[in-house]
Amino acid sequence: MAFKLNYKGKLAYLTIPSFEETELVQHGFSTRLGGVSQLPYQSLNLGFKREENRANVIENYRLFCDALGINPENLVASDQVHKDHIHVATFMDRGKGIFKSSDIKSIDALITRDRQVALVTYYADCVPLFFLDIKTPAVGLAHAGWRGTVSKIGQKTVLKMMKEFGSLPENILVGIGPCIKSCCYEVDEPVVEVIKKAFTYWDELILETETGKWMLDLVLTNKKQLEEVGISPQNITESGFCTSCNNDLFFSYRKEKGKTGSLAAVIQLI
């Protein structure tokens, strides 16, 4: 089952059916539709690191949070650098990176077991990973570009939830959000060599083209490493969307040659 596309007025966003069925969380993955940003960030840019009026981004957050039923004051933002560091967010972190300065630095994954703490991570082709431990309960988000994927940030997020919260892999649901898929993600030889060193099953992840380039499957790479730490394949939901193929719906850094906005994943325990 893929992610579900929802609308509130002109604003469109995605949710994960298996997460919704638990009634434990409010969550969503944004699209580029329904905000107030102007070209080239039209229209629901949620990234503060773009060259855009901060007031527009704040208004976009208010619109997105209203659609999700989340209080914007609950938001806790990551500070992503394509590495594998994970922060355990608490109630005291609310507002950091959105409405107030933040000491959450160089973080590509957030986890929490505190209720009413809305985790936020950013994307424009990289892989969004949603985590929900239905028993503890606890939630997490991880940002996995090719570097984060190679350093196994998704796998490490599960291990961190196990260590910090006592989570068990068999109780964790995972959503793999919209990202650039293997149909559009061409990589060069240096990246291929890194992939070969990181994964014994590298030949399943890369397809060589007739032009001597390679297409990398980041979704499969993340899925396989999650299964390695005990996540059941039946508990993993893939979005079904490629950000590059669906550039009318999503921001895509590669398709738009860097002149683009930021999408966001948000999740909080109710």
Image (cartoon, grey):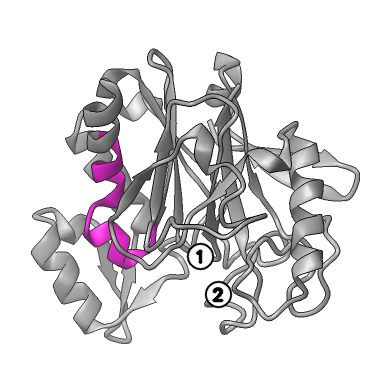
Residue that badge 1 annotates: 125
Q: Residue at x 39, y 49 (%)?
A: 109
For the residues labelled 2 and 1, say whether their Cβ atoms are less than 8 Å apart: yes
By secondary structure, the bulk of the magenta-drawn segment is best described as: helix
Percent coordinates x, y for residue 239 in the rendering: 53, 43
* Magenta residues (range): 144-158
* x then y, percent, for residue 86: 32, 48
150 part of magenta stretch: yes
Question: Does residue 44 appear left or right of residue 214 in this picture?
Answer: right
The x and y percentages for residue 128 are: 47, 50
Q: Earlier in the sequence, mark 2 or mark 1?
A: 1
**SS at mark 1?**
loop
Residue placed at 56% from the left, 52% from the top?
96
Residue 133: within the magenta? no
Q: Residue at x 38, y 16 (%)?
A: 136
Q: CA distance from mark 2 to mark 1?
A: 6 Å
What is the three-letter code of the residue carrying label 1? Asp
203 relative to 194, above or below: above
Compared to residue 105, the image places residue 65 above or below, namely: above
> 1 or 139: nearer the eye?
139
Residue 33 visible in image: no
Residue 27 shown left or right of residue 38 in the figure: left
